[in-house]
Amino acid sequence: MKHMTLWLVACAASLVLGCGGVPEEAASEGEALSTSSEELTVCTATCQQGTVSCPSTTTTCSATQYVGVTCDGVSIPCPTSSCSSSLPLCSDLYGKGCSGSSTVRVPCCDDATSESFCVCGSTKRYVCA
């Protein structure tokens, strides 16, 4: 029984004595890690036409959906669309049946920012530029 009591006292003493402060080297490493994680801050905002993000070197940022991001105090807005939302997508027209002349251009959107056109090809299917 004495051996058990001595063992318990030894364990308790080692726990109390073993719980000291953090060594100075470990504290400085922790601070360096904290700084590194801040340097890897990434902000991304969803936009009408995809997304906009801060560069990987950004230290502070914020994102507002459908508006843009602010990276280290510099605002990067969502891109504006130069293609009318009333136009069909060229990819939706491509290969579909048509009746008309190859000289008539049907305007369409290549993507949300660029306008293009399709024409009725000789096989009576849309061919897009």
Image (cartoon, rainbow, N blue to C red):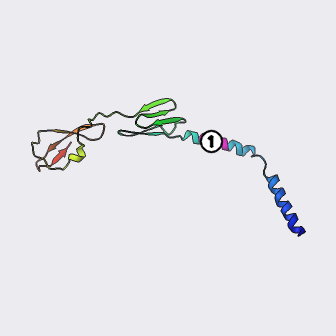
* Residue at point 36%, 34% (across, down): 79
* Residue at point 30%, 36% (across, down): 113
Magenta stretch: residue 32 in it?
yes
* Residue at point 82%, 58% (across, down): 12
In the displayed orientation, state which residue is furthest to the bottom: 1
Magenta region, main secondary structure: helix
Instruction: Look at the image and give the residue range highlighted in magenta.
Output: 30-36
Residue 22: x and y in percent read 74, 46
Q: Amino acid at mark 1?
A: Ser
Dividing the image into 4 quarters, which one contains the C terminus? top left
Q: Quadrant of residue 109?
A: top left
Magenta stretch: residue 67 in it?
no
Residue 90: x and y in percent read 23, 43
Number of numbered discs: 1
Is 53 displayed left or right of 115 in the figure? right
Q: Quadrant of residue 64?
A: top left
Q: Nearer the viewer, residue 4 or 115?
A: 4
Query: Within 10 angstroms of label 1, few (less than 14), some, or many (20 or more) residues?
Result: few
Residue 1: x and y in percent read 88, 70
Residue 121: x and y in percent read 13, 46
Q: Which residue is mark 1?
A: 34
* Residue at point 29%, 33% (across, down): 82
Is 34 displayed left or right of 61 in the figure? right
Above/below status of 116 relative to 125? above
Is 1 displayed left or right of 28 in the figure? right
Which element type, helix, strand or loop, lies under badge 1? helix
